[in-house]
Image (cartoon, rainbow, N blue to C red):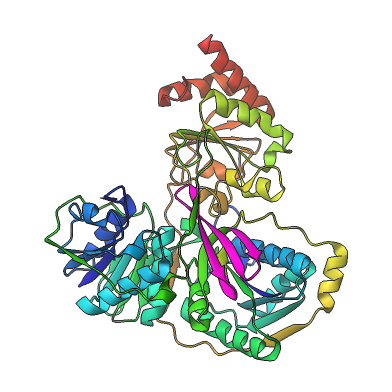
Amino acid sequence: MKTLVCVKRVPMTGGRIVLTEDEQAIETKHLGFAISPHEECGVEEAVRLWEHHGGDTVVLTLGPADAEEQLRDSMAIGIARGIHLVTDGEEWDPEATAGAIVDVIRADEAASGLFDLIFFGNESADSGGFQIGLRVAHALDRPCATGLKGVAVDGDLVRCEQEEGGGRDVYELPLPAVVTVLEGLNLPRYPSVPGRMRAGRKPLEALTPVRPASRLERARLVVPEGESKQAEVLGRGPDAAAAVVDLLEQIGVAS
Amino acid sequence: MNLVLVEHVDGAATDVSLQALALAAGLGGETHALVIGPGGAAASVNIPAAVVHVAEHDALDAFAPDAWASILGGLAEQIGATAIVAPGSGHATDAMARAAVRLGEPLAANCISVTPGDPLLVTRVRWGGSLLEEARLHTGRALITVAPHAVVAAPAGSPGSVETFTPEIADADLVVRVRDRVAPPAGGVSLADAKVVVTGGRGVGSPEGFVVVEELAALLGGAVGCSRAVTMSGWRPHTDQVGQTGNKIAPEIYIACGVSGATQHIAGAKGAKKILAVNTDSEAPIMSIADYAVVGDLHEVLPAISAELRRRRA
């Protein structure tokens, strides 16, 4: 089985988002980075499929040079090789991102056969465009199911469970297919030290595509004006219990 | 002219669809609505649009996103829509992204406001609502989904007219189709509907530590939640997670215990009417969004609250 997982490097924003002076990006000087959460589960799922079926597993990202960290993280838990579409750090819009991914998938498939299953996150944590997987699937003329919390390969089919209205809708797609997944699909493992050592030696192909003009053009980012509150302190330690229960009674949820 | 994809449940337009209609009204011009599948005709009579188009076809009993995209895109071309708007729910977003790629158009997901013009200006949600983006949409046919519960819904009203039609649906557009349905787990109070939510964060310290959280939630008839740090540690199932990539909650009161208040978590708790934080750190980010706070160790504070509740009930 040959699988591909597409991931995005995103900052871990912590308690408060601070923007750069030009309001075009998040100030990340003091932040760590991670794989966007939904895609982290995509990586884990691809590794589990490889553990059951063997074959080839590839992780792909479009992002700055530093995004190699997220490719290596993926390879550290078992992905065999990486493809890095290296950008100058400027954000690409969904149409451009999907276009570049389609080009590199076609090239890889021409060289080493079709991907049976391609994983995307349902939406990235930062830009939240909700469309890259569907755009890629359409260009490749493959079926795609979105928002999945269950993915099970059975012969030539993949059974997909999509969270909807509290329950789950079930789809069955013929392979090759594209799926977009959600956090909760699985519990991603942490890389081991030997895994990290191996990841450093795994093959990584780097390409530098050219960014086309954007039709969804970012003007600026704005941190929404939350009510900056100062919490009313009801007390310290267990002595606060009476004041808390007074509050619960006042709200009408104590009985 | 604007075309709005209206979802419906039990013969009535959903709230988020009425919110999409309200946003579309801000674009100016006439608004048409499209309802698809069984129940659409019943829903159409209360949709405030100049024309409600009702797509009926035997194959539409189960959701098939490519078929929806084909119907939506086809109707938009037929009536010359310059904007297509849909609620940012799972199914509608899925169908809209498919329609966008079929029509060769960009899609602006999860918008909260629009300003007509050339280019069209949109404000859209990033980071689950922790950040907003103002963007220009360079196209003659704008595809927009509307962030749920960010826009005041259009008041109910009657349509100018209702036009029922039978779309042509290609077999290829039925490959991706809901085949089966797994019902939601029975029993218990769901996080989404709970009036009281008590969550534990990293500060709970262990899976066993949640016993004090569970006790208080049970006494209040509420639901237990947790932060992403807890889920990623394997202490609680992901179904308990509150946050951008977990459950969105809207309780009367949200009691956040040992939760630092990362933006990822708060994105799921914005709907709470009141927030009470229980935390040893009076400087934690949660304190700047909470209404009330108890500074202290949750393992001492929560049992004391539970005991006080029992005492007053006795």
Percent x, y for residue B95? Answer: 40, 67
Q: Nearer the viewer, residue A198 or B263?
A: A198
> Within the magenta stretch, is there residue A165?
yes
- Can residue A237 be seen at all in this image of the molecule? no
Residue A82 left/right relative to B257 = right
- Work out whether B257 lies above or below A120: above
The residues colored magenta run: A150-178
Residue B221 at what x, y percent from top left? 51, 27
Q: Residue B144 appears in which quarter of the rendering?
A: bottom left
Q: Quadrant of the N terminus of chain B?
A: bottom left
Residue at 54% in and 8% down? B314
Looking at the image, which residue is at 40% across and 81% down?
A: A215
Left or right: A16 as drawn, with respect to A207: left
Location of residue B31 by image quarter: bottom left
As rendered, which of B73 and A188 lies closer to the eye?
Answer: B73
Where in the figure is residue B180, as x and y percent of width and height? 49, 55
Which sits in the foreground, B294 or B38?
B38
Q: Is residue B103 magenta?
A: no
Task: Describe residue A61's horizontal placement relative to residue B178 as left or right.
Answer: right
Residue B78 visible at all: yes
Question: Residue B4's quadrant in the figure?
Answer: bottom left
How many labels sit on residues? 0
Place of residue B106 in the rendered image (x, y in percent of width and height, measured from the top left):
40, 77
Q: Image point 54% across, 64% down: which residue?
A: A172
